[in-house]
Structures are given as C-alpha cells and as structure tokens.
Amino acid sequence: MTRSTHYYKLPNGLTVHLKEIHTAPIISNWMWYRVGSRNEIPGITGISHWVEHMQFKGTEKFPAGYLDREVSRFGGVLNAMTHLDWTTYFETLPAHVFEIGLEAEADRMMKSPFNKREVNRERTVIISEREGNENEPLFLLGEAIQMAAFSEHPYRYEVIGLKEDLKTMTRDDLYQHYQRYYQPGNAVLSIAGDFDITSMMEKIENNFSEIPPDVEFQTAIPEDPPLEVEKRVTVSGPGETSYVQIGYRAPSASNRDFFTLTVLDSLLTGPSSLNMFGSGGTSNKTSRLYRALVESEISVSCHGSLQATKDPYLYSIYLTVHPEHTPEEVLKAVDDEISYVLDSPVAQKEIERAVKQAKALFAYSSENISNQAFWLGYTEMFDTYDWFENYIDHLSEITPEDVLDVARSYLNPDNRVVGFYIPEQG
C-alpha cells in the first residue's frame, strides 16, 4: 500500500485529494462539505442534517433510489453522515464502475431540487427520529451536557436540531443553506483505491470543472469563554438504569494537547476511535477507570469519547451506574482515580501501554480502502492530512510530564459539566 497522495485544487475551488492503493480492484469516493451543526443558529438548528436527507430525494439525472439500486447491483456500499463540523457522502464500488458515484456527487452538488412536498415528508421523518432519540437516556443526558457546556458556540446543539426548529423551518431555509454551503470552494473530494492518478484527474475534470466557482463568504462562529466553575445537570426519563456523563472542555484537534489527551483517554478509559466508519477495536479492561469502577462493581461499564473537532469541544466520560450504587458514588470513584493522575506523573510503562493501545485502534480505523479515503477528507475538516500522517509520531513523543500537564489543565473540576440521568419512577 503506497503512502503517496496527490493534492490539488480545481479552478472553481474544489479541493481534491487522491491516493492510489492497488491492493484490491476497489475505489472509495468521498465528498466532504465544511458544514454541520457548527454552522447553525437558533431557528435553523438541525438544518445541515435535514439538507443531507434531502440529497437522497434525487435529481433529474439520478432520481430517488436510482443510485442506491445501482450501487447495490454492483456489490458496493454508500452512505452519508452529518456531524458537528461537516457533512459527507461516500460510495465504495468495484473500480470498473466507480464513476457513477463521481457523477452522482457532481450532480447533487448543484442540482438537488428540494421539492416542497418532499421537504414536508422529510420533516415528519426527522421529527420522528428526534422523538426516538428522546427515548434514549444517553441522548437526553448528552444534550443537557452540551447545552450547559456551551453558552454561545453552536456546539451546544445536537446535530439533529431542536424540535421547535424542525417544526418551523421552510423549504426556502433548506435551499438557501444548500446553496450557501454546497459549493466547490467549501468541499473536499477524497478518493482512494485502484486507479491511475492522471486518469482519475481527467474524470474529475470532466465531472466537476463546469460547476461555477463559489461566492466567497465567511461564517462568524461565536467563541465561548472558558468554564470557570463546575456545572451540574440532572435529567430524568424512561428506563431503569442511572448514568453519569462527565464532559470536560477539550482542545481542538489541531492543538498539540489533543494528542496528549488522546493518550490520557486511553489510560483512563481505553482508547476512543476517531473514525466513525472504522472497524476493529481494543479492550479497555486495562484502563484505570475500568479496573477501579467496573471490576469493583461500582459501575457496570465505562468508556470515553474524544472527538477531532475544528473548535474546542468536549472530552466525555460515560458510566453506567451499578444498581447497588448511586451516581454520586460513581462520580466520587472517578474523581478519586483522576486525583491519582493529577498528583504525580504516570509511570513511563503505563504511558507506553496507553500509546500502544491508541496506536492499535488508529491502525484498525485505517486498514481498508474506504477508511483510507475517509482520512484523506476527514482531516481537512479540522486540520490537514499531515495530521493523519504524523499522528503516530505525535503519540510517540508524549512524556509522563506532558500527560500530567494536560491532566491538570483539562481534568480540572472547574472545567467540566457533570450530568446524572435518573430513571423516572413508574
């Protein structure tokens, strides 16, 4: 598998990142747009996710369902996802038929009609999705944590949006959002697989060169002041199990502290996967919180989540409360364990094990052609591809002193929101 990649821009502003991988006759094609819940304001929360749904309603050239049928017929896969900083669409297909995905992405960049009747049908679907989420304890708790952790930044809103906005947004709201953000200068096309770069560049030119250049715009994203005191939220809802979520304000992925916090996460809860489309995994049974809380039956499970984001977001620790304990007891056990990390440097041997686990998970998330294409574009949403290429080197440079400094900076109780989920008593 070659590490060489080719990076360039079309005259209309479209960024293209290509990587030849000749291990299998497969090509994975991803189109990324720098738009997600980060680009939303009250009144239109959830609009980026809704626009993604509308992109599957078809165009004149690719009617609804056509692309799905063709991709399935050739044994390929396709999907899409909206997140905090981005929206992406991908098709992974046998190399000899991959161009249908390229054609479809070029077509939906500028020719989606946003039929008013389809908009209203999808409104029902998305509100139903939102209401389904409201039956999930960790969704309710997570939303409360985000609202408390951010007062100004749009990261305070869930990607799916607020129900009151989903009820009132119009077809014109959606279409204007689409026109503003679905343009070449706001997009990254990343392709990996069994192709010749010169030939691929010709195909990209044929499909995308006639799309007009974008109109320049800037979106002002409000910054949040640092948290100065611990916040607590309590949420009640359906179910029989209590949960604890602790959300610490965390650095953006381009900040060097992010890599150290990745190792600290691996040490405390086991490594978090940075690739939402990845495969494989590693055990967290050697992590400190697993040994301290799960093995002693204070909590049923624990895991961490550190996401690569453009702006500072959250490092979260999730715990399922054991039936014989309370959320307060779980929180105290977590704080006791974190205090050990804050008091003195972690042993070099433990750092090496945590780095090894993080590296292993990173390798699992990079092992196939689809994942290679994913990383080509994903890293451009918050930094550059160098971030991916140098990730292992950054982890290898981390010292016990680095971990101690970052732990003291970010795992401070005044830098967090603590959330308890308490089941409603029936």
Image (cartoon, rainbow, N blue to C red):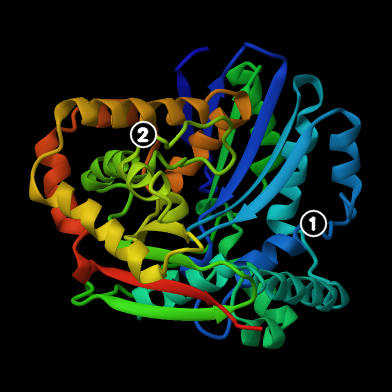
Furthest-front residue in this view: 324
Work out whether 85 lies above or below 136.
above
In the drawing, does residue 196 fall left or right of residue 326? right
| Residue at which label 2 appears | 286
Q: Quadrant of residue 394?
A: top left
Labelled pair 1, 2 in contact (Cβ < 8 Å): no
x and y percent of residue 282 in the render?
47, 31
Q: Residues within 10 Å of mark 1 (few under 14, many from 20)?
A: some
- Residue type for callout 1: Phe
x and y percent of residue 142 in the render?
49, 68
In the drawing, does residue 420 fall left or right of residue 129? left
Cα gap from disc 1 to disc 2, whole angstroms:
43 Å
* Residue in the image at 65% along x and 82% along y: 163
| Secondary element at image label 1 | loop
* Residue in the image at 83% along x and 60% along y: 57
| Residue at which label 1 appears | 56
Work out whether 370 lies above or below 22.
below
x and y percent of residue 27 in the render?
68, 25
* Residue 160 visible (yes or no): yes
Q: Nearer the viewer, mark 1 or mark 2?
A: 2
* Residue in the image at 66% along x and 83% along y: 426
- The one nearer the camera, 374 or 337, is 337
x and y percent of residue 277 in the render?
59, 40
